[in-house]
Image: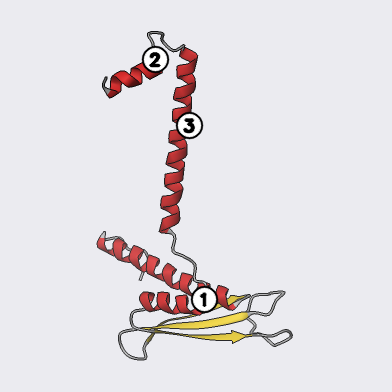
Amino acid sequence: MNMVGMAWALANRGGTEIAPPWETAIIMTAVAVLAVACALIAAHLRRRSRKPKPVADQWQAMAVMGELCPHGWQAQITLYGWGAPIPADAPSSRVPLVELEWKQFDEEPGRVVVARRVWAPTIGEALHSMVEDRRTDLALEQIEREAEEAGEQWIDE
């Protein structure tokens, strides 16, 4: 007996009796629900795999920034203790702040392309913010390149 014949026999309870319509409806509904669940899981896994992993420590930050800044970069971390005077442009916070100033260098030695400052409650979050700033810059640079290639102008110069 071939596979189609076996499936037909099993569907008909091994005999010539045909399954009632309500059983068929239940099975079809279960198949549809499982198909939707599989599609949602696949979409979630695909979306999750696209997101870059957050930077958790200094070694990851150094590796990622090394890739994102091919001509070099520099960072300086300043920790502010309880009651320490902080700069006027620092955000208000109930905990001591971490200031991270970072620079990205150009091909020409010593020429700074980007200089930024980020504030965070912890060193790890400051490092993560620095990496995310650079990733955002790269995304914007890519958008600008694509717009120039398409002949569009974003900013009036």
**39 in relation to 150, above or below:** above
Q: Earlier in the sequence, mark 2 or mark 3?
A: 2
Marks 1/2 in contact by CB < 8 Å: the verdict is: no
Residue ranking furthest to the top: 16
Label ID, residue 46: none
Residue identifier under label 3? 33
Marks 3 and 1, how far apart at CA: 42 Å
Looking at numbered disc 1 in the image, what kind of residue is underneath it? Asp
Residue identifier under label 2? 14
Category of crowding for the residue at label 2, using alpha-carbon neighbours closer than 10 angstroms: few (below 14), some (14–19), many (at least 20): few
Left or right: 144, with 84 as reference point: left
- In this rendering, which labeled residue sits more in front, label 2 or label 3? 2
Instruction: Tell me the element at label 2.
Output: loop
Where's residue 110, x and y in %? 37, 91
Looking at numbered disc 2 in the image, what kind of residue is underneath it? Gly
**81 in relation to 93, above or below:** below
Quarter holding the C terminus is bottom left
Left or right: 53, with 66 as reference point: right
Is 124 in front, or is 136? 124
Category of crowding for the residue at label 3, using alpha-carbon neighbours closer than 10 angstroms: few (below 14), some (14–19), many (at least 20): few
- In this rendering, which labeled residue sits more in front, label 1 or label 2? 2
